[in-house]
Image (tube, rainbow, N blue to C red):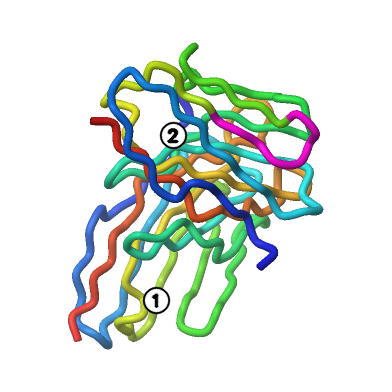
Amino acid sequence: GQQVMQIPQYQHVQEGEDFTTYCNSSTTLSNIQWYKQRPGGHPVFLIQLVKSGEVKKQKRLTFQFGEAKKNSSLHITATQTTDVGTYFCAGPLGTSGSRLTFGEGTQLTVNP
Amino acid sequence: DTGVSQNPRHKITKRGQNVTFRCDPISEHNRLYWYRQTLGQGPEFLTYFQNEAQLEKSRLLSDRFSAERPKGSFSTLEIQRTEQGDSAMYLCASSQGGGRRTQYFGPGTRLLVL
């Protein structure tokens, strides 16, 4: 079936190091969304990418949507302890295009 | 607070019991979604409503699960004859429209079936 895959599953970094998580879809996506989930929390929307090759920045976070609209990445520059959490990508798959299919997430831990 | 709210936040029940969860979406949102999340996994889609109409259901939604949104506002998710495998976080999300519309998640109901 249609899938969204994410790597790596876990990433441990020292504070100040950079972090990148990658997302790949088995099919072309109309858009891709990124969420952050803190430990014990719920997914919080970060951003949506729609256009092929789109790049968006939010402070230290850079989001990219691939040219073929099948892959995406999230890069955090100079991580801080507040960046700790699991980062999920999600794409609208299925016949209606309304259900979000989430990747398994990348769990980021930041050592101070 | 005008975000998505869910009640209860935690539920412990014994196997075989029925449980019901409630979700109140953001007031102007016409779409409401239910997802299930187990430890270490991303949320998995269960079902969604547009207004009061249930438009899509996942294979994960067995016949023990039923969801309603009777007046197109709040929604309930009922699990009958709970099993230990039903233990998970049940997340509700809402959006104004579908497709490219952002889904905003509630805090979830964490279910533990003993």
- Which amino acid, mark 1? Ile
Marks 2 and 1 sit apart, C-alpha to C-alpha, by: 25 Å
In the image, what residue occupies the spot 60% across and 40% down? A92
User: Which one is earlier in the sequence, the residue at label 2 or at label 1?
Assistant: 2
- Which amino acid, mark 2? Gln
Q: Chain of mark 1?
A: A
The residue carrying mark 2 is A3
In the image, what residue occupies the spot 60% across and 36% down? A99
**The disc label shown at residue B92, or none:** none
Q: Is residue A87 left or right of residue B106?
A: left
Pick the residue in front: B74 or A42.
B74
**The disc label shown at residue A76, or none:** 1
Pick the residue in front: A40 or A44.
A40
Q: At which x and y percent is residue A90?
A: 51, 48
In the image, what residue occupies the spot 61% across and 64% down? A54
Which quadrant would residue B76 be assigned to in this image? top right
Q: Is residue A74 left or right of residue A100?
A: left
Label 2 environment density (alpha carbons within 10 Å; few <14, some 14–19, many ≥20): some
Which quadrant would residue A51 be assigned to in this image? bottom right
Q: At which x and y percent is residue B105?
A: 56, 53
Q: Chain of mark 2?
A: A
Magenta-drawn segment: B70-77
In the image, what residue occupies the spot 32% across and 63% down? A39
Which quadrant would residue B41 be assigned to in this image? top left
Q: Main secondary structure of the magenta part?
A: loop
Q: At which x and y percent is residue A33?
A: 56, 55
Check disc 1 and report its element: helix, strand or loop: strand
Q: Which quadrant, please, contains the N terminus of chain B?
A: bottom right
Check disc 2 and report its element: helix, strand or loop: loop
